[in-house]
């Protein structure tokens, strides 16, 4: 099979090694069925430093079975809503008539627009409005027919891997690859809202790279930015975080989302960490040009030494700054004669002996 690409073009920029991480503000259902609020969220995501404002394209009847959920005793987040899961999903639908208007709005203000599609028509709509990539939610990782359909669009794909085993991930990755897609980012995810930091398993990104020779990312639902920063340190090139204007707003996603201040700080921290990562080479940087001298030691005269006198070990101090002969040559200097007068407290140079 053709290997996965290590550099992918998303919109007007590249992701992969040597490029800044692509940061997605996952708006999800946080627009609360108000297109003007959706635009405010897009504005806020842009101001916070996000590269993309992302939504979710689903119709309740095409994603959940009300009767199926009603037959379950739900202990997780779905069981906290106090009403039917299908009702909650219906209220959270992203109207299909809004897709183009919001995609155009994103283009106007200079941020990417995308949406995760959860049915075949939604995939076609995302392609029609020109999303720069398609992100596949963890819940669809075993829907191989859908994975193949999305892979054939020619769009770069981001695949979340929450709830999945390595064998399921392998099957999904091969399905996408068989369908002709080589622009794939494999994203670690813990599918709980919110998820626990101690469940994050950031190190699995190393396994993904080793197993699939692929770009990696993290779709994070945990509080704060520690998981995001750990992922960046391990080479993640895509980050996704839920985003809201107010964590206290009503709705299924607000309370586990980052608000504007938190998201802005996360982006700043990510960019700072990327700058701090540097390279694998070890070298003296420009700001160390003075400290490399003032913090190190060299050989100094412990007494006044006259020209022609033998320099003894007890005549030598090892002091800062490193202006003279390095300390490792102390035993070589000892026993030599001074070529000139060396004042007490002054460095000993090679030309001094």
Image (tube, grey):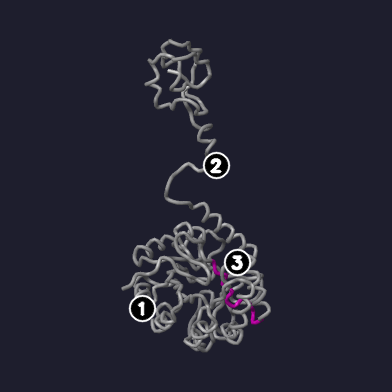
Question: Residue 287 got which mark?
Answer: 2
Tell me the magenta residue range: 23-34
Whether residue 112 is situated above or below residue 290 in the rendered picture = below
Nearer to the camera, 214 or 161: 214
Pinpoint residue 209: horizontal percent, then vertical percent. Answer: 38, 63
Residue located beneath label 3 in the image? 258
Q: Residues within 10 Å of mark 3 (few under 14, many from 20)?
A: many
Does residue 232 belong to the magenta stretch? no
Nearer to the camera, 303 or 136: 303
Inspect this view and state whether residue 290 appears. yes
What residue lies at 57% left-to-right and 57% top-to-bottom? 269
Whether residue 91 is situated above or below residue 173 in the rendered picture = below
Q: Earlier in the sequence, mark 3 or mark 1?
A: 1
Question: Of helix, strand and loop, which mostly describes the magenta segment?
Answer: loop
Question: Residue 175 got which mark?
Answer: 1
Pinpoint residue 27: horizontal percent, then vertical percent. Answer: 59, 74
């Amino acid at each position: 099979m053709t290997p996965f690409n290590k550099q992918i073009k998303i919109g007007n920029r590249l992701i992969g090694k040597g490029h800044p991480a692509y940061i997605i503000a996952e708006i999800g259902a946080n627009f609360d069925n108000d297109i003007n609020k959706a635009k405010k969220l897009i504005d806020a995501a842009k101001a916070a430093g996000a590269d993309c404002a992302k939504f979710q394209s689903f119709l309740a009847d095409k994603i959940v079975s009300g009767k199926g959920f009603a037959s379950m005793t739900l202990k997780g987040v779905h069981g906290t809503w106090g009403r039917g899961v299908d009702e909650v999903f219906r209220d959270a639908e992203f109207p299909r008539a809004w897709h183009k208007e919001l995609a155009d709005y994103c283009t106007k203000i200079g941020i990417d627009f995308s949406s995760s599609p959860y049915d075949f028509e939604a995939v076609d709509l995302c392609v029609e409005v020109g999303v720069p990539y398609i992100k596949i939610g963890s819940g669809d990782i075993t829907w191989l027919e859908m994975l193949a359909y999305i892979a054939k669009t020619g769009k770069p794909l981001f695949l979340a891997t929450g709830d999945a085993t390595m064998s399921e991930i392998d099957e999904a990755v091969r399905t996408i690859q068989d369908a002709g897609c080589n622009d794939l980012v494999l994203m670690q995810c813990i599918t709980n809202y919110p998820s626990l930091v101690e469940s994050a398993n950031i190190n699995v990104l190393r396994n993904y790279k080793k197993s699939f020779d692929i770009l990696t990312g993290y779709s994070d639902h945990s509080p704060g930015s520690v998981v995001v920063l750990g992922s960046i340190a391990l080479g993640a090139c895509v980050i996704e975080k839920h985003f809201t204007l107010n964590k206290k707003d009503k709705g299924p996603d607000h309370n586990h989302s980052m608000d504007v201040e938190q998201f802005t700080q996360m982006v700043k921290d990510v960019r700072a960490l990327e700058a701090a990562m540097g390279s694998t080479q070890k070298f003296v940087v420009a700001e160390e040009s003075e400290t490399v001298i003032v913090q190190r030691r060299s050989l100094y005269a412990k007494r006044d030494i006259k020209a022609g006198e033998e320099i003894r070990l007890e005549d030598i101090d090892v002091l800062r700054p490193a202006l003279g002969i390095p300390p490792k040559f102390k035993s070589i200097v000892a026993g030599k004669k001074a070529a000139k007068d060396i004042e007490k407290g002054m460095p000993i140079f090679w030309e001094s002996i």
